[in-house]
Amino acid sequence: MKTVNVAIMGIGTVGGGTYEILKKNRALIKRTQGVDVVVTKILDRSAELIEKRTGNKDIAVTNLDDILSDDKISIVVETMGGVEPAKTFIKKVLLSGKSIVTANKELLSKHWAELEQAAKDGGAGLYFEASCVGGVPVIRTLTESLQGDNVLEIMGIINGTTNYILTKMTEEGMSYGQALKEAQDKGFAEFDPTADVEGFDAVYKLSILSSLGFHTCIPYTEIYREGISKITVNDIESGKELGYTVKLLAIGKKKGNKVEVRVHPTFVPSAHPLAAVRNEFNAVFLKGDCVDDVMLYGRGAGALPTGSAIVSDIIYCAKATERRYTDFENNGKLNAPTEILSDFDSKYYIALSVSDKPGVLSKFTEVLGNYGISLNSVIQKGAADGFAQIIFLTHTTTENAVRNAVDEIGKLKVVKSVDSLIRVI
Ligand code: NDP
Ligand code: HSE
């Protein structure tokens, strides 16, 4: 029986979940995988937390050197989060020849090239299944199941916190603030929840997934981002009336050398499978040129689901006979000949507050017509104080056409405000 000594850096939600699984399923892992995984050191700011989580104060360390100097430790789990000191710690660990298993999508998407180089230099492995979509094995699916396919599309709900918030607002009429607080209390949200609600977390994950799926470096800075903080109860209610549910979607598409990568709130038809993905659950559609559609679904956040992905990486790493690194030029830059397509096709929901007067509608339809935008439906909602809300649903058009048209419409005297612009699938 091979014994593998592991250190954990950060024993919060995910680190705690990882420890719990390794303890609970130790016998199963020994029996089925032939490896005895033993956590021998834990680094965290709080020795009390380590003792509370493990019942063992003797494995607490406060210094990285205590891990680096322990020759028996071959795998180090990083579940501290954030960029620093995680980056410095991980690089030192990798350069010392120990492998890293991490859930840190922010760090990976921002400094993947540097970390991978350190792994190569140290002859170590860098594993990060837990960084994307919690317990759902999407990275292994992309790298080890769909290697023979050209992945054409990656689309899904890849942030648990925003999905939890939108579900609670839609189904229970809960306020945005209350729903966010619940997501924080349940341990789904990032340390700074702005990363979740403004779409950064989904952008980091889409950068990792689209780079792996499309075999080319897609820097997170190239991904269009819009969060959910501007979504109103009014949008949610209007969407319901029109047969749509609002979701924060991450979308990556590849057509030849052109790649479309974006994260934004999206109206999804209520009968669409993604509309049924509720609370902290995530789902990812993958489309390959041979396999066609694959859908993965599961918990995208939380202690045990994310811990499950970490444990899977520990076992994978313990059993690996060679180190595998990315199969594209992982230099943190957009690799030629890949180009980012910013003028993508979509349908749109546009909500305007306008003067409730005769002839107003024709002014908007004229502008939309000038940009070649064809309307699917128009709805006027309750008038008050001489203003009404007009909602347009367009047929498929282009992002640039809609942006230009809405810009022009917003300058019309009869328009009080452009309230919402939401893409529709
Ligand atoms: P937590 O805040 O719950 O846990 C992090 C732990 O690490 C805390 O105990 C923290 O202590 C400790 N820590 C942070 N910095 C240091 C440091 N410099 N030295 C020693 N200890 C430190 O975070 P999560 O478990 O939620 O997240 C960890 C990582 O996993 C993040 O990268 C996150 O993005 C990722 N992730 C999280 C998921 C989730 O569901 N929560 C799901 C998927 C990925 P202190 O509290 O004192 O700062
Ligand atoms: N904050 C993240 C989320 C954790 O809510 O999805 C999982 O990556």
Image (tube, rainbow, N blue to C red):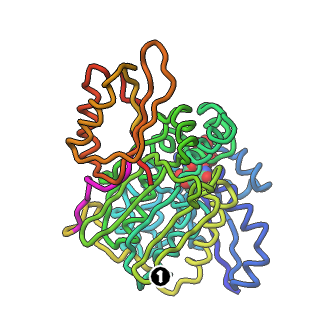
The quarter of the picture where residue 30 lies is bottom right
Q: Give the range drawn in magenta.
A: 338-348
Q: What residue type is labelled 1?
A: Val
Of residues 269 and 312, the one nearer the viewer is: 269
Residue 255 visible at all: yes
Residue 173 relative to residue 69: left or right: right
Q: Where is residue 24 in the image (x, y as percent from the top left)?
A: 79, 67
Residue 64 percent location from the top left of the image? 53, 56
Q: Which of 335 and 415 is in front in this view?
A: 415
Residue at horizontal 28 percent and vertical 46 percent from the top = 373
| Numbered-mark total | 1
Density class for disc 1 (Cα within 10 Å; few <14, some 14-19, many ≥20) is few
From the viewer's side, name the closer residue of 203 and 110: 203
* Residue drawn at the location 47% of the way across and 50% of the way down: 201
Residue 120 position (above or below residue 17): below
Q: Is residue 257 magenta?
A: no
Residue 307: quadrant of the picture: bottom right
Query: Which residue is labeled 1 in the image?
Result: 291
Report which quarter residue 214 is drawn in: bottom left
Element type at mark 1: loop
Would you place residue 395 above or below residue 422 in this image?
below
Q: Residue at x 73, y 65 (%)?
A: 21
Q: Where is residue 401 in the image (x, y as percent from the top left)?
A: 24, 46
- Rendered-image quadrant of the N terminus: bottom right
With 263 as the anchor, is 58 left or right in this view? right
Judged from this view, the residue extending furthest toward the top is 385
> Is residue 62 something that shows in the picture?
no
